[in-house]
Amino acid sequence: MARKYIFVSGGVISGLGKGITTASIAFLLKASGFKVTPVKCENYLNIDAGVINPIEHGDPFLCEDGTEADMDIGTYEKFLNEDMSRVNFVTMGQIYKDVIDRERRFEYEGEDVEAIPHITNEIIRRINESSEKSNAEIIIVELGGTAGEYQNILYYEASRILTLKYPGNVVHVHVSYMPTPPHLGEPKTKPTQLSVRTLNSVGIQPDFIVGRSEKPMDKRRKERLALFCNLHTDDIISSPDATTVYEVPLQLHQQHFHTRLLTKLGMSHREPKVENWRKMVEQIKAKKTNSVTVAIVGKYFGTGEYQLRDSYAALFDALDHASWPNNVEVKTKWIDAGKMEKMGIEEMIGVVDGMIVPIGWGERGAEGMIRAASYARLKKIPFLGLCYGMQLAVVAFARDVLGWKDANTIENNPKTTHPVIHLMPAQEKFMKHRAYGGTMRLGSWEAIVNKGTLAWEAYEAHGGFIDRGKGLTSERHRHRYEFNDTYTKAFEDAGLVISARSVIEHLAEIIELPLKNHPFYLGTQGHPEYKSRPLRPHPLFLDFIKACKAHP
């Protein structure tokens, strides 16, 4: 069977939900029995998302194979319940680098190397590579950015080339926005008309329009879009704001979007199995009997005069996933760690049922995070430290309990006399040569969890072990600094528990306090938030929320 391609583009504004639409299409086609694979094509010239400030482009998503990707890759994993990898994530930087490297190796045999066909050929090669690895029948390609940007024009050109080369095997879905100006009170179709006109100008006629709006699209709006955008009214799909993004596949299913897609691709229709997903959405939307407030003490919330959720997207998703089985509503309180360095900690934190100190880099805000870790330990507030949060919890314990007042991570104070968090020798070499991109401990790493610990109980209760007999589990990693084993005995004698160590190099992976001293105090060097799925919440988050629920 010939490969089938579905391209998903965006119009009018960014952050529209193009990734959610792509994931929802993939979900419906997979639920219909087809083998699918999604691919995200990013515009930037970075090789990956690893060195991008999370305030600039959101939380980089970490894959099992160590790929530092866009947040949409995480959305694909959550909707499909499948691991993504490097072949699902393409950047313009990767494309140009590979083409230029080939030119330097004389692989083009003296030919002029140009954007067309060499760049577009490389884009198409990478799109097809994702299908080859997964043996997918249908490739769903999300084109980054919005129609009309010069950065993504070559992705659109690749789409146009494939459409001409494989007629009947390529479908183009355009996700666009219909604003409802308050002074008018009706959704306006003109922005979408102009966006489609932009697509037409590069030789693409969309097969479908997915209209994002506050409320469901009415017949009048569908008729206007169909008339001016050269489509049938049945090919205008309504995608109104939803209570939860996990409701979107059901919205599309209700409009038989999957059926129309398959018809355009010349494929047989199969009714998707969505019952488990529907039950999950009902559980999400059901009124909760309890609520908990969790303080997130982070450093990447601000963007100008606005606050940004995307910097910790995977974390917020993991909290949501864990809240549903616990039948609680999770309210998050965002606390700027930088401000906590100067202000009263009790005043800033207030009354909360739990605290998380998440991922971070560098000295800014670190002292505020350390204060937060100390406060949660002393006040017996359920605490979860993630990567940097785990490291700074170790620093807090060293200062407060062991009395090493200058204890620190050498990331923030290379001259500390108690470097309780330090660099491994291999990482020192990378840092010396400013080799930052893709050089951390990345991807999935296995660890052995000790029985009788909080970590063991969580993995045991919620099916988190790869091999229960060995206590073997696996988490994704994205860091370069490690717990300094020189101080292990001093920490353990003072009551800190190292509850998991890596299979390779025997590195400390999880630290915690015993239940007799604290209801839930745990830090993990890994990133459980990246492995959480809506139908399979992560064990550590499930037990953290359970502890928050029990907090007086």
Image (cartoon, rainbow, N blue to C red):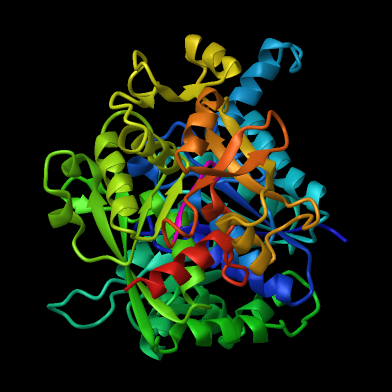
User: Which quadrant of the rendered structure holds the C terminus?
Assistant: bottom left
Q: Is residue 32 above or below residue 160?
A: below
Between 61 and 516, the one lying in front of the other is: 516
| Residue 550 visible in this rendered orientation of the protein | yes
Q: How many marks?
A: 0
Identify which residue is drawn at 80% across, 61% down.
137
User: Is 74 positioned to the left or the right of 342 in the image?
Assistant: right
Res. 480 in view: no
Kindly identify the residue that appears in the image at 50 percent across and 54 percent down.
514
Residue bounds of the magenta highlight: 520-526
**Residue in the foreground of this view, choosing between 301 and 262:** 301
**Is 551 covered by the magenta stretch?**
no
Q: Residue at x 72, y 37 (%)?
A: 503
- Quadrant in the rendering for residue 362: top left
Q: In the picture provided, is 382 more to the left or to the right than 429?
A: left
Q: Which quadrant, please, contains the N terminus?
A: bottom right
Q: Quadrant of residue 75?
A: bottom right
* Residue 160 percent coordinates (x, y): 61, 50
Q: Residue furthest right?
A: 1
Looking at this view, is 379 or 87 the one in front? Answer: 379
- Residue 521 % position (x, y): 44, 54
Q: Position of residue 310 (x, y in %)?
A: 37, 53
Please say if 228 is above or below 271: above
Q: Nearer the viewer, residue 121 or 480?
A: 480
User: Is 522 in the magenta?
Assistant: yes
Left or right: residue 104 compared with residue 365 = right
Which residue extends farthest front?
493
- Residue 37 position in % (x across, y down): 71, 57
